[in-house]
Amino acid sequence: MSRLTPVARITLDGQALTAPEAALLRAEVTLGLGPAHDRCWLELHALSRNVPSPGGQVAVALGFDGSPEDVFTGTAVRVERRPQGSWVECFAPSWKLAQRRAAQAWVGQGATQIVNDMLGDAGVDAGTVGADLDVAVFHADDRRSRWAHLVRLAQLAGCDVASTPIGALDVRPPKTGPASATLRRGAELIAWRAAAVEAGPALAPVGPAGAASEAGAELWHLPLASPAGDAPEREAFVPGALRDRNSVRSAGQARADAAARRTVQGEALCWGQPKLRPGDLITLADLPDGDIDARVTAVTQVLDADGFATWIDFEGTT
């Protein structure tokens, strides 16, 4: 049986350092799907000569036996001095969108173009952007951050929002296909728990805002009196950005798919898995009650004196 040695590479303002060179005591990286921002905490020894200043660029790679994988790229936002050393808090570049407030409107543009405009305006690199939704009009007012508007648009388009290991931002449909990782009980998987969740109440129907009447060509200029139907039995969801049946149907299906993915929820602890990212598909294998096919919703990577471990939050279907 081989023995693996946890390793880390910390890059501070372009200077790459091993864990001993950086005097690293502990690294914790939390990764999630929007509206969460990826965050990183570094605990450095009191004798460390490489403590970043707020605003400094930080990149973290974790792994085993001299081959660390990039897991986080961002900016130091808070540096706290303590008797035992320094505590550095960092955010991924998506944090810039949370600091940016500006009023702007887009008319007759796709969600992909709107997302790219928001990212470019905030100085955030675009990763994979595939928000396939036609938007009649989208208003981003300055009462909320650009991040809030981007996440809202992504939810309408049925897309995940997640940062990449190098700090770019992905806005893309949920992944499909085979699992990218298999975590086996007694091997990679240390502990787990999974719960079947009762389905909630039926989702409110989605209706188009200001859609034209369907009573004939001569009445095209009259908006629908009831976007959700002639006699809706309960409240309806009528997003102002969607004005036609096709986009409404797409948004409604995205909401239904998201609800279906949450009928199983759980968490797992495993040996360090630096390649795992939120949105990845995994299989928890060799469990007493059978395998679980799941989607990762959050990842926490921790490297310290006890070793390198990964905590995973996941969701799935029964």
Image (spheres, rainbow, N blue to C red):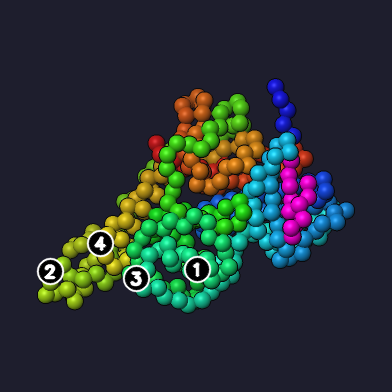
Looking at the image, is mark 2 or mark 3 earlier in the sequence?
3
Q: Secondary structure at mark 2?
A: loop
Name the magenta segment's main secondary structure: strand
At 77% from the left and 55% from the top, the residue drawn is: 15
43 on left or right of 271: right
At 78% from the left and 46% from the top, the residue drawn is: 19
Range of the magenta residues? 7-18
- For label 1, the residue is 118
**Residue 184 x %, y %:** 56, 28
Is residue 292 shown above or below 123?
above
221 on left or right of 241: left
Looking at the image, is mark 2 or mark 1 earlier in the sequence?
1
- For label 3, the residue is 108
Looking at the image, do the residues carrying marks 3 and 1 touch, with CB atoms under 8 Å apart?
Answer: no
Amino acid of disc 3:
Gly
Q: Distance from label 2 to label 3 (Cα)?
A: 24 Å
Amino acid of disc 2:
Ala
